[in-house]
Each structure stands twice: as structure tokens, then as C-alpha cells.
Amino acid sequence: MKIKKFLTILCILIVSATTFFGCASVEYIRAIDASNTIIDKIAVSLNESDINKGGMTLSSVMSSIDNDMVVFRNKVETWKIREFAEYPEILARVQEGIKVEVSQPQRNEISLAIEFDDWDMFGLFYGYANAENFEYTRFLEDRGPFIQNILNSDYDDNQYGLFIIKYSMLKSVSFGKDIQEYEFSGTNYYQKYKDMFVGRYDLEDVNISQIFAYPDDRLHSNADQKDVEGDLMLLKWDLSNKGDNFEMSIYKITANPTAWYILALVLSAIATIIISVVIYKKSKGQVVTLIEKKDLDKYE
């Protein structure tokens, strides 16, 4: 699935772009489809009225964000050449297998998306791939949800309920604190844009959400919103009103066979008792004939 088609599906959840409260809305999206195409995306929407109240114009802020995203895209291209120029076959795969796209669908919306053709490309970019016969430096340390656990098959132990079992459980800590501390190429973007508004707006004025899309409609989660689009399960967490220690979680459920077996035995026993009682009561209510008609006839 190519990036434009994939992003069209993802944008279904970005409905709040023009109806959010606060000066900005930021959505982080990580999506994996059935063909193992992976997309990481950040989508930013600005509230023009609040931008103006902060002493800036929408065009100037959008231009600044666009420049930052273009710098990121250019650094990715530089990284490809720097790290893999000595390995032409790998470089050719990386050039086609890792693509960065900056788009501005509306005058107050802008996004940056990284498309990975497969897990190998994703692994090279974030340093998860086990490189053989060559050395390289990853481009980024992965800060997105769940992936490290999925790659390492690092699932939590099963949790048993009375009639259901949770399994394949994954948890990922919210990244609210990381936003304030994270730097890229020596720039703290949180501080940069906070200073741009002379401290008028803070993280509390930004609506932040995380979307995780995965090709498995059996997933359950503690997400605030869940939807199915095609073969993708779309999960969305609103992180604006949750603490830094909030954990996003996904899991699957199945029946607890022991509990259901015991329940079946109990119900069978109860049914047996009920039937026995009914039969007993019916037998007590019947008229018992002590003298038959033929016994009377012989006296006539």
C-alpha cells in the first residue's frame, strides 16, 4: 500500500483538525498494514485565532514548521548517503525503502510522514536491524509505541479473569514528558515554539494524541477511540488530559476454558437437580389406584 493511499486511511481519524480547542493539535501516528508497510507520521493543526492572540501570524508559524520538517527530510537523505554509500545494494534499497513526505493539505495543517517498505528498512532507521558485514549509525532512537516489544516478542504474561484471558499484552508509556525534553540536531522544538509566543502558550494549550494502526481486528485496548478501516484496527489515545505516567495498552482476549468448563458442570448439575425435583413433585401429585375396576366387577 503506497503512502498516499495509506495516509488517506489514516486521515480519517484526524477529524478534529478544525474543531480543536487550544492553540494547536498534534497527532502522532504509527501504522502497520498487512503487507508490513510501516508509516510514522506527525500531523500538526493550528488554531489561527489563538495564533494571532499569541502575537504571531498563521503563515509565519506554518512557514517555521514547514522549514523544520524540510530540514528533517533533508537530513534523512544525507543520512542515507553518509551511512550506506559504501554499500551500493543496501543504499539502493534504502533510497526506495525509506521515504519522507512533507504535505500541507490545508492552510492551517501540515504533516510529515516517513514510509518504510518493510521491517528491515524500519529497523535500519531506528537501529533495530541486526546489520551483518557492515556498520552504520541509526538515524533516530525510536520513541513510538509498542514496536520494540513487538519485534522482541516481549509480551506481558497472561492475565486471567473469571471467564476471559488477556494475552499478547503490550504497554507503552505516554510521551508527554519526552516532548519537552527531546532534541533533534541540537534543537529543542518544544522550547523553540514556546519562546516564539513569548511563553503565552504551554504544553497544556496543545491537544496531543497518539494513533496506532495495526492489521488485526481482534485487538483490544484502553484507547479513547477505536475504529476499523479496511484491514486496519485504528486506536486513538487522547493524551492531553492524562499524566506523564499514563500507559497505553493493547491486548487480545480469549475464553478461559477452565472457567467455562466448571460453569458447564455447575449448570449441568443444577439442571439435573431441577429435573429430579420436578419428576419427584409430579409423582407425589398423582392419584394412586388401590382398587382396580375388575376387582369391583366380581361383586356384581
Image (tube, rainbow, N blue to C red):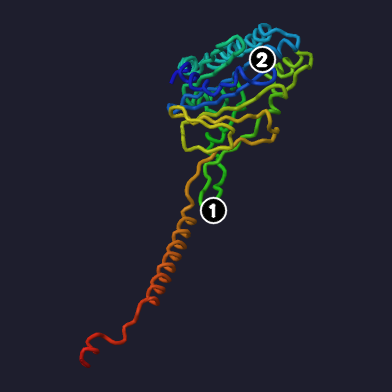
Which comes sooner in the sequence, label 2 or label 1?
2
Q: Amino acid at mark 2?
A: Asn
**Residue 134 visible in this rendered orientation of the protein:** no
- Discs 2, 1 touching: Cβ within 8 Å: no
Quarter the C terminus occupies: bottom left
Q: Label 1: which residue?
A: 162
Secondary element type, mark 2:
loop
Q: Is residue 2 above or below residue 222?
A: above
Which numbered dot is residue 154?
Answer: none
Choose top left, top right, bottom left or bottom right for residue 100. top right
Q: Mark 2 highlights which residue?
A: 47
Neighbourhood count class around disc 2 (C-alpha, 10 Å): few under 14, some 14–19, many 20 upward = some
Under mark 1, the amino acid is Leu
- In this picture, residue 102 sits left or right of residue 64: left
Give how far across and how far down residue 63 sits, in percent: 65, 7
From the viewer's side, name the closer residue of 131 and 157.
157
SS for dot 1: loop
Of residues 139 and 5, the one drawn nearer to the viewer in this rendering: 5
Q: Is residue 144 above or below residue 54?
A: below
Nearest to viewer (mark 2 / mark 1): 2
**Quarter where residue 77 is shown:** top right
The CA span between labels 2 and 1 is 48 Å
235 over 18 or under it: above or below: below
Q: Position of residue 222 (x, y in %)?
A: 59, 37
Q: Front-most of 294 and 277?
A: 294
Whether 285 is drawn above or below 61: the answer is below
